[in-house]
Image (cartoon, helix red, strand yellow):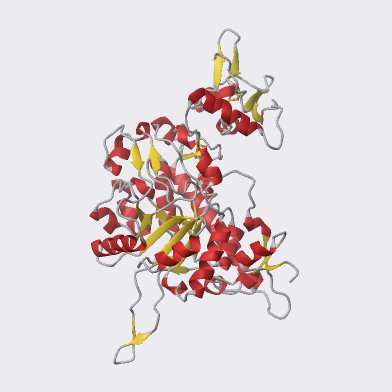
């Protein structure tokens, strides 16, 4: 007892020749790393509190700071890594479950990086997206099984309600409470300007954001926080959250310290009470039960809203998705194990679930084999990092992709993975007023708009190179992908050939 077993993970390196003791770093750091020592007349740092969020580094006017990963070493080996040793010290000190934020950081194959995209040469010429039309507009929802006409021969519009996106990208579910008001506003405004959708997550919809309803997907999760008729009616679509890629099989927990003011009113729970979502929906124990909820929500909204069912990518995902496709849902969102989160038990985040690439390919294959692929749209989520990931996801069978962590990075997140502390120095994963105002929604929404527009340009360029001029022609077109360094089994599940074939 009394011994501090854990050596700080990071070292704050200050160039004293450059530092002018302006104390910006002291004011900017919510973790209270920096302090002005009046006796010494200089700045000092407590390395043990540093989370490497780069706020001080980015704002230091003289570039006097940088953060280094500590050179302190354990006598580690391939089995007992520094992380594993530190985790045991931490648990031996607290007796508690380890908590983490953001997605799974483990060194497990990222299949996006093991797939290469085709380009046309000679016989099937590429298309120049600057000179020829290129369609990235995407429609989501069930496709009619057959075309029906009235007596005058006019086509009867018997399509179920759907979503139309200017490009096949949406912002993932992130609740008000886990992210700040200003982050939420940035996402909502960007979605409206881009003609896409953002997702409330399970925290309800703040009154101020009802005006963004036509670009809002609202969630109905196991805790039913903030769910009422007006909430459902305001949205463009409703998502039933059955699972989340970062923590499959468990519920959610937003600590009472974050349930303050408007967050508590929006969730419809008392201030200071923990928001605990149960692991299951207590009214869903079968596909038939899920079907009842799907139709209850449709009934409550006059059959005007498409229903999405969101599930975590897990072992028997294809069979689960097949059931959901028969439940009356219009879309299935599949969230891979690298998906981000505000807080998850570390063991769950790092060990449960499967990669989105394998899950998506196996679901698309199964639904095609069963002849029900047109009954639902597939949304891929869980670490979509760039435009080529989107193209690969669509070629594997997705209709559109959700991005979460990527959107937060556009807002300034430095992926320090300490969202669960509520002290986000970038004003994103926090409810502290002084921190929230650091994120300007004017700038935030513009940065999100820039990001998605840039990706849209890149998607068009890549599609043009393939000689494809619409998302429709790319969807499920696995001939456009080749694997590199993959086993026969991996190629079989992905449904693609190896490079060179
Ligand atoms: S922000 Fe930079 S210059 Fe100002 S006190 Fe900190 S290290 Fe020194
Ligand atoms: S949202 Fe904030 S706390 Fe969370 S990883 Fe990003 S910078 Fe860190």
The picture places residue 317, in percent across and down from the top left corner, at: 49, 60
Query: Does residue 75 appear anywhere in the picture?
Result: yes
Image height of 283 relative to 329, above or below: above
Quarter holding residue 309: bottom left
Rendered position, 419 above or below 405: above
Residue 87: image x %, image y %? 57, 31
In the image, is residue 166 above or below residue 175? below
- Of all residues, the one furthest to the bottom in this rendering is 152
Depth check: give the residue in front, 138 or 59: 138
Look at 56% across and 39% down and name the residue there.
414
**From this viewpoint, is residue 128 visible?**
no
Residue 421 is left or right of residue 177, and the answer is right
- Which quadrant: the N terminus? top right
Residue at the right extreme of this rendering = 500
Left or right of residue 53, residue 191 in this image: left
Residue at point 49%, 25% (across, down): 94
In the displayed structure, 109 sits above or below 421; it is below
Q: Which quadrant is home to the C terminus?
A: bottom right
User: What residue do we see at 68% from left, 37% from top?
Assistant: 79
Q: Quadrant of residue 324?
A: bottom left
Q: Quadrant of residue 78?
A: top right
């Amino acid at each position: 007892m009394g011994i501090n077993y854990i050596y700080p993970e990071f070292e704050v390196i200050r160039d004293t020749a450059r530092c002018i003791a302006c104390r910006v770093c002291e004011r900017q750091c919510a973790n209270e790393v920096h302090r002005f020592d009046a006796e010494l007349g200089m700045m000092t740092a407590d390395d043990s509190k540093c989370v490497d969020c780069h706020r001080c580094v980015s704002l230091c006017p003289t570039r006097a700071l940088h953060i280094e990963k500590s050179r302190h070493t354990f006598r580690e080996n391939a089995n007992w890594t520094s992380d594993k040793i530190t985790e045991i010290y931490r648990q031996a000190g607290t007796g508690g479950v380890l908590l983490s934020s953001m997605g799974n950081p483990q060194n497990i194959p990222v299949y996006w990086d093991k797939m290469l995209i085709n380009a046309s040469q000679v016989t099937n010429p590429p298309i120049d997206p600057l000179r020829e039309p290129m369609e990235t507009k995407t429609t989501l929802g069930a496709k009619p099984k057959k075309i029906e006409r009235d007596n005058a021969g006019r086509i009867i519009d018997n399509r179920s309600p759907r979503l139309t996106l200017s490009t096949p990208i949406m912002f993932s579910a992130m609740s008000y409470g886990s992210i700040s008001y200003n982050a939420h506003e940035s996402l909502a405004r960007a979605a409206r300007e881009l003609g896409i959708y953002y997702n409330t997550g399970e925290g309800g919809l703040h009154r101020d954001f009802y005006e963004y309803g036509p670009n809002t997907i609202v969630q109905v999760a196991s805790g039913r926080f903030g769910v009422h008729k007006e909430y459902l009616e305001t949205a463009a679509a409703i998502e039933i959250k059955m699972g989340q890629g970062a923590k499959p099989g468990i519920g959610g927990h937003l600590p009472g310290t974050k349930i303050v003011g408007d967050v508590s009113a929006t969730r419809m729970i008392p201030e200071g009470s923990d928001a605990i979502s149960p692991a299951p929906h207590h009214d869903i124990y079968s596909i038939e039960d899920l079907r009842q909820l799907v139709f209850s929500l449709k009934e409550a909204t006059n059959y005007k809203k498409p229903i999405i069912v969101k599930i975590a990518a897990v072992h028997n995902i294809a069979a689960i998705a097949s059931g959901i496709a028969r439940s009356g849902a219009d879309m299935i969102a599949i969230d891979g194990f690298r998906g981000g989160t505000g807080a998850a038990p570390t063991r769950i985040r790092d060990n449960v679930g499967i990669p989105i690439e394998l899950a998506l390919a196996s679901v698309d294959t199964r639904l095609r084999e069963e002849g029900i692929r047109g009954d639902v749209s597939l949304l891929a989520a869980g670490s979509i990092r760039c435009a080529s990931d989107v193209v690969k996801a669509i070629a594997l069978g997705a209709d559109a992709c959700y991005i979460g962590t990527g959107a937060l990075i556009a807002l300034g997140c430095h992926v320090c993975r300490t969202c669960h502390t509520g002290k986000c120095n970038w004003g994103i994963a926090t409810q502290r007023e002084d921190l929230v105002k650091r994120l300007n929604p004017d700038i935030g929404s513009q940065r999100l708009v820039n990001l998605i527009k840039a990706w849209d340009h890149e998607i068009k360029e890549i599609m043009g190179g393939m000689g494809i001029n619409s998302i429709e022609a790319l969807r499920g077109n696995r001939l456009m992908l080749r694997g590199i360094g993959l086993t026969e089994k991996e190629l079989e599940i992905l449904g693609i050939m190896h490079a060179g074939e």
